[in-house]
Image (cartoon, rainbow, N blue to C red):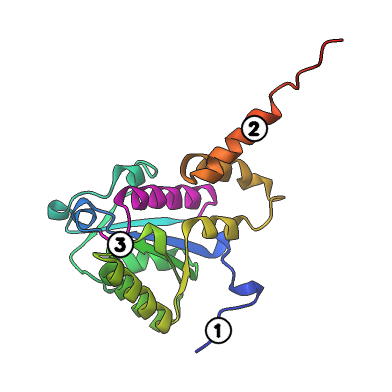
Amino acid sequence: MTFRNGLKSLLRPEDSVLVLIDHQPYQLTNLNSHDPQMVVNNTTALAKTAKAFGVPTILTSVIAERGGLIFPQITNLFPGQDVIDRTFINTWEDPKVVDVVKATRRKQLIIAGLWTEVCVAMPVIQALGEGWDVTVITDASGGTSVEAHEVAIQRMIAAGANMMTWLALAAEWQRDWARLETVAALTEVLKEHAAGSGIAYLWEQQLLNTPVPVPAH
């Protein structure tokens, strides 16, 4: 097994492409590895982060006519962008999706989806076998049980996949706070979706703008 280490192994926005798979109502109804609200929040944060860094985001669903449309929190971020609807359970067997990914000419493939053990694991394992550098965003994904999610993660790690959370990815893409062109947009995502960190930032801004009382003489 080739170890993933060194500076070049870290994710870079200019080399990344994000694929969001099957964030649909049917899958959400049997999501038991995570709080469903958290997965919707994290996936929305992931999509917003990709948009802030100019990372192409491909949206795909499976038989949306029956399984439902991708959550509007996601599709509303990409007005006018088509969602690629599939019959293949394995996204990577559908040339419509793969051709769009390849057209970006990027090699760091980032995937999140529902369910982890099915619609995430299959394309990740296939893409790894084809030489892609694949990262799974585990907290924007979820399975039918905690066991299903965790076993799928183990399976993908054994195949060579990299595992991250959305906030870790955001920090890795930013890498340096001196990259001012993305700081404002990233800060907005943190404020809206990073819970304690976002609220702490707002509190910090409040304190910085609160006059210090001057004692009377």
Type of secondary structure dominating the magenta stretch: helix
Instruction: Please tell me whether mark 2 or mark 1 is closer to you in this view.
Output: 2
Give the numbered dot on residue 135.
none
Q: Which amino acid does label 1 sit on?
A: Phe
Q: Where is residue 40 in the image (x, y as percent from the top left)?
A: 34, 49
Q: Where is residue 86 in the image (x, y as percent from the top left)?
A: 21, 62
Residue at the spot of label 3: 33
Mark 2 and 1 residues: CB-CB less than 8 Å, in contact? no
Residue 33: within the magenta? Answer: yes
Badge 2 density bin: few <14, some 14–19, many ≥20, Cα 10 Å? few
Relative to the observer, which residue lies in front, 45 or 128? 45
> Going 46% across and 44% down the picture, which residue do you hit?
193
Q: Where is residue 179 in the image (x, y as percent from the top left)?
A: 68, 50
Mark 3 and 1 residues: CB-CB less than 8 Å, in contact? no
Q: What stretch is highlighted in magenta?
A: 32-55
Q: Which residue extends farthest top?
A: 217
Alpha-carbon span between mark 3 and mark 1: 28 Å
Q: In which quarter of the image is the C terminus?
A: top right
Q: Which of marks 2 and 1 is nearer the N terminus?
A: 1
Alpha-carbon span between mark 3 and mark 2: 35 Å
Residue at the spot of label 1: 3
Q: Which residue extends farthest left?
A: 66
> Going 38% across and 45% down the picture, which residue do you hit?
78
Residue 70, relative to residue 132: is it above or below? above
Residue at the spot of label 2: 205
Residue 124, relative to residue 55: is it above or below? below
Instruction: Residue 22: name its quadrant.
Output: bottom left
Judge from the rendering whether residue 20 lies leftward or rightward of residue 89; answer left or right. right
